[in-house]
Amino acid sequence: MATKKKIETVCGYSCSDCDHYTKECPGCKQTKGTPFWTAFVNASQCPVYECCTTIKSLPHCGKCPDLFCERFSRYKNPEITEEEAAASLAAMEKELRSRK
């Protein structure tokens, strides 16, 4: 079985792991931080993407001294448990801290 290519994002999540990728959303890089879910929370842009790229001009949040700020928990996926959310954040942090 072929391993799917990981699509890196500024927040450490991989668009290639998202069920909505290619269906409702072409990815954060292509949408410039306005993935499909921003329409459901009345946001013009993902707050993590906006802070990282627009405000701080960083390549990703792993370069930010404030990792993890409140922007990461501002919006919660209602379809996952608190444990799943915590595991996802831990994976994102590991990914971000491993980047150069």
Image (cartoon, rainbow, N blue to C red):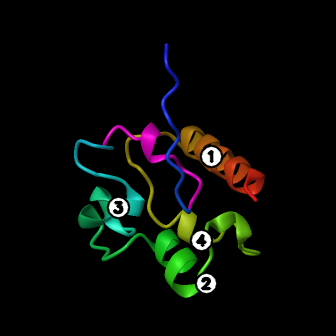
Q: Is residue 41 left or right of residue 91?
A: left
Callout 2 amino acid: Lys
- Residue behind mark 1: 86
Above or below for 75 versus 83: below
Q: What element carries label 1?
A: helix
Of residues 29 and 80, which is closer to you in this image?
29
Cα distance in 3D space between marks 3 and 2: 20 Å
Q: Could you classify mark 4 by the number of other residues whose Cα lies within 10 Å: few (under 14), some (14-19), or many (20 or more)?
A: few
Q: Could you classify mark 3 by the number of other residues whose Cα lies within 10 Å: few (under 14), some (14-19), or many (20 or more)?
A: few
Q: Which of marks 2 and 1 is nearer the N terminus?
A: 2
Callout 4 amino acid: Glu
Callout 1 amino acid: Ala
Which is in the foreground here, disc 3 or disc 2?
3
Callout 3 amino acid: Gln
Residue at the spot 48% in from the left edge and 30% down from the top edge: 4
- Residue behind mark 3: 30
Q: What stretch is highlighted in magenta?
A: 11-20
Q: Position of residue 8 (x, y in %)?
A: 54, 51
Q: What element carries label 4?
A: helix
Q: Which quadrant of the view contains residue 44?
A: bottom left
Which is in the foreground here, disc 3 or disc 4?
3
Q: Where is residue 39 in the image (x, y as percent from the top left)?
A: 24, 65
Residue at the spot 50% in from the left edge and 83% down from the top edge: 54
Q: Is mark 3 on a helix, strand or loop?
A: helix
Residue at the spot 61% in from the left edge and 70% down from the top edge: 59
Cα distance in 3D space between marks 4 and 1: 14 Å
- Residue behind mark 2: 56
Q: Which of marks 1 and 3 is nearer the N terminus?
A: 3
Cβ–Cβ under 8 Å for marks 1 and 3: no
Cα distance in 3D space between marks 3 and 4: 24 Å
Of residues 42 and 58, which is closer to you in this image?
58
